[in-house]
Amino acid sequence: SQKEALFSPVSSSSSSSLPISQGDRDRVINLDHGDPTMYESYWQRMGEETTVVIPGWQFMSYFSDATRLCWFLEPEFANQIVRLHNVVGNAVTENRHIVVGTGSTQLYQAALYALSPDTDAEPISVVSAAPYYSSYPLITDCVKSGLYKWGGDALSFSKNGPYIELVTSPNNPDGFARRSVVNRSEGILIHDLAYYWPQYTPISSAANYDLMLFTASKSTGHAGMRIGWALVKDEDVARKMTKYIEINTIGVSKDSQLRAAKVLKVISDNSERPNADDSFFEFSYHVMAKRWKQLREAVHESGLFSVPEFPPQLCKFLNVVFEPQPAFAWVKCEGEIEDCESFLRGKKILTRSGKHFGVGPKHLETRKGVVSDKMLRGVENKRRSGDSRIGEA
Ligand code: PMP
């Protein structure tokens, strides 16, 4: 049937009617862990422009700029962060301290350390509205800190006293724009804006929050550089975050910061040029738009699933009206399938169940890149050839 065809064992031969070999039967499509390699072809096209050469004797010191609050932040990287936010218009950088981290994952931990009250009181609750990014509870409770503790879904949080609320906007996993939901005066907010870039969501205004987290992993696709940055209004908080990173890793790789500075510079340079062919955000916007179109078609054809519908909005950077196109898909099984993850696992497609995100098993997330390139190619080939098997692993 059509439904079976969509998730049948994958085939390496998309246009012939050869039987499926044992090797192909054993193949698995892993959509559990995302990886932003979908932007590789853009960076390949940029060629030498982003190449960084570092002689062995250079950048040996722990220090980058001892006069700065964040003494391990490379000045050129700081300049390029400010420049890129100004070019894109997605965050206010005036009167902010920049703290660099080994990915925004380290900065999240630094923020928890810096924002937790310095008292002997019980650990402060850390909450986020479900569905929330599945790593938050794991990172928060990893070392069973005496300072902070995962408090679960912010929507059902009723404890009195101070709390930390994490606001991810656009949200991982469902892609919706978000605001804080607890709305009590004792709340301390962390805004994770990893996906507030024009390839994923319309940029409607410059975010202007007290503590904002960004990462190269999602903005430029350079997850392997392990570089994130925080824009922090309060000097004491920025100082404490810096202290945490000093204690944790004595700073952040200079090699990575210099590479990140170059990558950000190329994006800003190309965005400011009138030639749209070279614009990173034009390129990445089209990659995501194409994948969402294909994903929505596949979901529609299957009759088994649904994905979120988003209201269109004007993006002031790209100057187009579009619907958010997240880096992942929050898929709901419709009808009788109770456990979407197990159902797809049976079809050799690995996903992450809704229960990791604080909701039920009817939901699941497929990660970065939405559906693998090869799987989508399978959808195209099927249409061309009339073959009933789709997807290649
Ligand atoms: N926040 C969100 C919402 C994410 O999805 C991710 C990566 N999956 C991160 C933070 C962590 O990113 P980084 O690679 O910078 O540690």
Image (tube, helix red, strand yellow):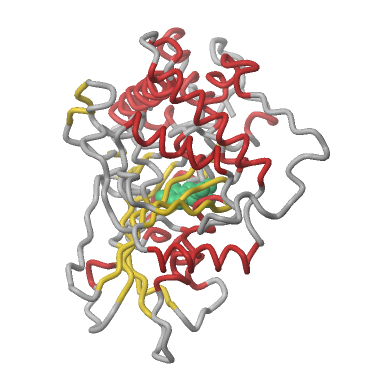
Q: Is residue 113 above or below residue 359?
A: below
Q: Position of residue 291 (x, y in %)?
A: 39, 25
Looking at the image, the residue that sits furthest to the right is 56
Query: Which residue occupies 53% across, 62% down?
Result: 242
Where's residue 266, x and y in %? 51, 23
> Can you tell which quarter of the image residue 318 is in?
top left
Relative to 221, residue 142 above or below: below
Quadrant assignment for the C terminus: top right
Q: Which quadrant of the rendered structure holds the N terminus?
A: top left
Q: Quadrant of residue 71?
A: bottom right
Horizontal and vertical percent position of residue 287: 42, 22
| In-front residue for pair 94/322 | 94
- The picture quadrant where one finds residue 27 is top right
Residue occupying the point 54% across, 50% down: 103
* Between 154 and 294, the one nearer to me in the picture: 154
Q: Position of residue 169 (x, y in %)?
A: 30, 48
Name of the residue lying farthest toward the front? 67
Question: With respect to residue 48, does 106 lie above or below?
Answer: below
In the image: residue 208, left or right of residue 355: left
Q: At 49% from the left edge and 22% from the top edge, which residue is drawn? A: 389
Residue 341 in sight here: no
